[in-house]
Amino acid sequence: MTENQSPDKKKIILSGIQPTGVFTLGNYIGAVRNWGKLQDDYQCAYFIANAHAITVRQDATKLRQQTLQALALLLACGVDPQKSLVFIQSHVPAHFELSWVLSCFTQFGELSRMTQFKDKSAKNADNINAGLFTYPALMAADILLYHADLVPVGVDQKQHLELARNVASRFNGLYGDTFTIPDAYIPQVGAKIMSLSEPTKKMSKSDENQNGCIYILDDPDTLMRKFKRAVTDSDACVRYADGKDGINNLMTIYSIATGRTLEQIEAEFSGKGYGDFKLAVGESVVEMLREVRESYTRLIADKAYLEDVYKSGAEKARTISARTLSKVYRKVGFLQ
Ligand code: ATP
Ligand code: LTN
């Protein structure tokens, strides 16, 4: 995670997730599930974005618990601290320090165009705080501190990535080569998993409607109940087509859980009803998540191990990030 110029060096991957609750099937399919798979081919860094989480009001005790839970979930989903750098954002002060500098190179107009800001302002009309607005500058700092080449995220984060690229290029243009320009790494299938009850809306951890949202720790009965209730259409034919948002979403999920293509799925369910299809999707997700739930139960019981992981991660992350920060401070003219 030093500057990565030699051609035989592995590329650097970095991503983060907010500790705002149990991860959803959307978080899993769109992002976290892929993180473990990248660890052998890339130099990876994954972190819990607890500083981003407080842009929306959080209960302190709950946030602490959810931060540890998010760490255990990350590991249960296949992130291995022996292979990847794993840490908690607030343990690494350089994120906040660089964020300030970058916010001075980010325009009001750019931040105003962010759809996540608009969505979250609408949802939290009584708390449209400055942190919610400058959220992407902190996210750019997260990425640029570690010279990430690729950032694996769901499609909803693409706009923030674009902004990080623009800020990095702007800074490099003014002060010479400082930051690596990161690329988004978005899965071709499943980059946006929709709510089961409102399939035109993104499945989201913080959604009040629990029935539309699959949590990766849901027990098999709960999973099956939610899939049975999933909203579909009156066409009664399992095929992927415009306007069939509910079925398209279920087909995407089933395709990822079973490795089958959309054509194979259409053939498998030709002549069968939605009832059979929903049962099959439910069962495939129960299977896909079985191991995650089992590993999580083991990990969350071992607080000493989790503490070791985040302490040693913090130490490494502080060393790497301090180097980038000091370079930036020099470039902008802060007296050493
Ligand atoms: P919150 O509801 O608290 O805003 P969230 O569920 O949207 O949270 P984040 O922590 O913001 O989740 O996102 C973590 C990762 O999961 C990001 O890479 C994001 O792109 C991805 N992601 C979130 N929701 C989905 C979804 N429905 N489909 C695919 N990927 C998703
Ligand atoms: N904004 C992201 C979480 C996040 C992130 C990052 C992702 C914070 N910093 C850096 C990738 C790289 C989200 O998922 N809502």
Image (tube, helix red, strand yellow):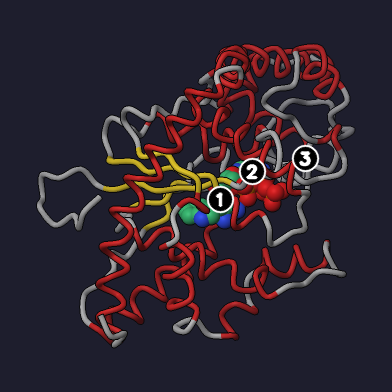
Q: Earlier in the sequence, mark 1 or mark 3?
A: 1
Q: Earlier in the sequence, mark 1 or mark 2?
A: 2
Q: Do the residues labelled 1 and 2 touch (CB within 8 Å)?
A: yes
The amino acid type found where label 3 is placed reads Ser
Q: Which residue is drawn at 28% across and 65% down?
A: 324
Decide: few, some or many residues near mark 1? Use Cα within 10 Å; few <14, some 14-19, many ≥20.
Answer: many
The amino acid type found where label 1 is placed reads Ala
Give the CA separation, mark 2 to mark 3: 20 Å
Task: Judge whether 13 appears above or below 180 on screen.
Answer: above
- Is disc 2 placed on a helix, strand or loop? loop
- Residue nearer the viewer, 320 or 114: 320
Q: Mark 1 points at which residue?
A: 49
For marks 2 and 3, give the one nearer the viewer.
2
Which disc number belongs to residue 19?
Answer: 2
Q: Name the residue under label 3.
A: 195
Q: Position of residue 196 (x, y in %)?
A: 80, 35
Q: In this view, does 190 lie to the left or right of 316?
A: right
Residue 28 in which image quadrant: top right
- Residue nearer the viewer, 235 or 66: 66
